Amino acid sequence: RETKQVSEATEDIISQVDICFVIDTTGSMGPYIAQAQRRAREEAARIAADGELDVRYAVVEYRDHPPQENTFVARVYPFGDDAAFQGALSTLSAAGGGAGPEAVLDGLIEAAKLQWRPFADKLCFLIGDSPPHGAGQRSQWPEGCPCRATPNGVVEMFGAQRIKLHAISIAGDSFTTKAFREMAEPVGGTCTEVASPMGATASYGETLT
């Protein structure tokens, strides 16, 4: 009986999947925000349907730093069940932010700080149309994000926790694609440049390989 209990506990741990969606909700995302929400829902449903999995979801939305944005820099919706996830997505709307780079790094840092389960498969999906500050595109902070975070620092945080980052660069901006790729690939993820968030799909198995 003890062996059976240990086996069941091990199976429970193996079946754990934590997923966080980090989404740009600045004004420039207006044409894409509904698609980003739908993309997140479809990706979550696809993963949840791939076997008997214990899945939790979180959402982080980010905008920019003052004076470009005075509402919030990043807003966190912590891990919860599907109902909480759907509720979080439904609150997202595109507004504010400045022209060009946004607080991408702040959003990713908040994602890394979530209460990820230690033995879960950890997946993070970044959806945005602008690069972080300091990534080459014209910015009020050309030397880097005013939060003083760096892409390398984000990579280290994700790598230390075994969080795989998959990035979706929309609107065809080369600076965005380059910056997203340089953060996703070192932690075993991918960056896809698409015309809309619906242009990239992957199965749960593909996101883990």
Image (cartoon, rainbow, N blue to C red):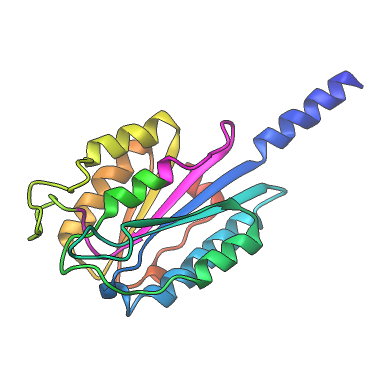
Numbered-mark total: 0
Magenta segment includes 174: no
The quadrant of the rendering that contains the N terminus is top right
| Image location of residue 55, percent across then percent down | 63, 49
Q: Residue furthest top?
A: 2
Q: Determine whether, in the image, residue 99 is placed left or right of residue 87.
A: left
Q: Nearer the viewer, residue 170 or 65?
A: 65
Q: Nearer the viewer, residue 38 or 75?
A: 75
| Image location of residue 187, percent across then percent down | 36, 37
Q: Determine whether, in the image, residue 53 is placed left or right of residue 39.
A: right
Give the answer, above or below, for where 164 lies relative to 200.
above
Residue 190 appears in view:
no
Q: Residue furthest right?
A: 1
Q: Which residues are magenta?
A: 111-132
Residue 64 appears in view:
yes
Q: Determine whether, in the image, residue 57 is placed left or right of residue 36.
A: right
Which image quadrant is residue 188 in? top left
Q: Nearer the viewer, residue 84 or 118?
A: 84
| Image location of residue 34, percent across then percent down | 43, 77
Give the answer, above or below, for where 150 lies relative to 84.
above
Magenta segment includes 113: yes
Give the answer, above or below, for where 102 lies relative to 172.
above
| Image location of residue 13, percent across then percent down | 67, 34
Give the answer, above or below, for where 143 lies relative to 29.
above
Give me the residue at 48% from left, 46% from top. Answer: 123
Which image quadrant is residue 24 in? bottom left
Give me the residue at 10% from left, 59% from top. Answer: 139
